[in-house]
Image: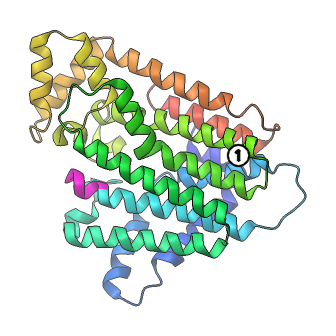
Amino acid sequence: MNLGDVYEPIAEDLKTVEDLLRSSLSNSKNKSVSAMNSLLLESAGKRIRPALVILSNKATSFGDKKTNGQRELIEIATAMELIHIASLIHDDVLDKATMRHTRPSVNAQYGDDISIALGDYIYSKALQLIANCRNLDVSACISDAICVMCEGELSHVCQRGNLDLSKSRYIAIAKKKTASLFAASCHAGAILGNHNPAVQTSLKEFGKNFGVAFQIIDDCKDVLSEESELGKRPGQDIITGDITLPLLILSEIVGPAERVEIRNMLGAGNDKGNLQKLKAMLVESNALSRTCEVITSYLNTAKERLNPLADSVYKESLGRLVDYSMQRIS
């Protein structure tokens, strides 16, 4: 299964999102800004957040003969991707990352100062699109999510190197820094679908649980995957001292000497030997299987939250998106 298969029912909508992304990022009269934005457009991601907006909208409004609101739907879907792009630019500055989607990161090419300003600029483009929709519920949903996301990222950075972080605290941070935008994407799509609050809440909970699982999967892949698959240098979490769930579980399993060794690896720089040793420790212990159990639990809960929806190709695609995510670590 690939994302093209999952996105097939909304392929035309996503093409429209891509067109709006391109026009939003290429309408600057400043040649330098246009050049940087072109770089971002060449480094396309999975577009999961706009897909969640559209699929949630169409799944909750399935069978409704009303056809109005398509412009607002595309603008909100595009805004969510712009918010995600801006957050990645800022994340790469915080992580001193040099690669993103197989290409040099913005900060690697232009420096931290320009990267921070560019991220702010892209946030502003997202806010313009949200304002165009003139929907206070959607605006509140997204603005709350941005606030929570930024708070989560700040907490995440403050906990670097803290191998004593509790697993519950890690999950709380993941819900904020990653899952909040997934939840808001689903919630905003459902709001635009004009459905009742209970259904909107179900979609929001779907996004939150899916988002937590997605973050933990990324944690695992950062250690286990190769650069060709990741599109960036593996082991970035280790290099920057970021605390992840597989590391926390591993630190519980190993003895005191190995725990000290893991602690010393965090933030120790780009040492491929550390990455290989940590990978071996994860594979040889049951830390990876225990982490996968947590992932599976969140993905199963996400699927359960789809139960109130009427059967449709859009509901099916949301479920298949969950299956695709599990496939990433199998």
Q: Is residue 126 above or below residue 302?
A: below
Residue occupying the point 22% across, 50% down = 95
Q: Is 164 above or below relative to 254?
A: below
Horizontally, residue 162 falls left or right of residue 271, namely: right
Q: Where on the picture, by quarter, is residue 226?
A: top left
Asked whether, in this view, residue 327 is left or right of residue 256, the answer is right
Residue 95 included in the magenta stretch of the image: yes
Magenta residues, start to end: 91-98
| Residue 44 included in the magenta stretch of the image | no
Question: Residue 252: x percent and y percent?
Answer: 25, 14
Q: Residue at x 71, y 34 (%)?
A: 306
Report x, y in % for residue 38: 39, 74
Q: Is residue 200 left or right of residue 232?
A: right
Q: Position of residue 49 (x, y in %)?
A: 54, 52
- Give the quarter of the image for residue 320: top right
Q: Which residue is mark 1?
A: 200
Place residue 209 in its image quadrant: top right
Mark 1 nearby-residue class (10 Å; few <14, some 14–19, many ≥20): many
Q: Secondary structure at mark 1?
A: helix
Residue type at mark 1: give it: Gln
From this viewpoint, is residue 43 visible? no
Q: Quadrant of the N terminus?
A: top right
Give the camera-side residue of 64 and 160.
160
Q: Residue at x 68, y 38 (%)?
A: 202
Out of 42 and 61, give the one closest to the viewer. Answer: 61
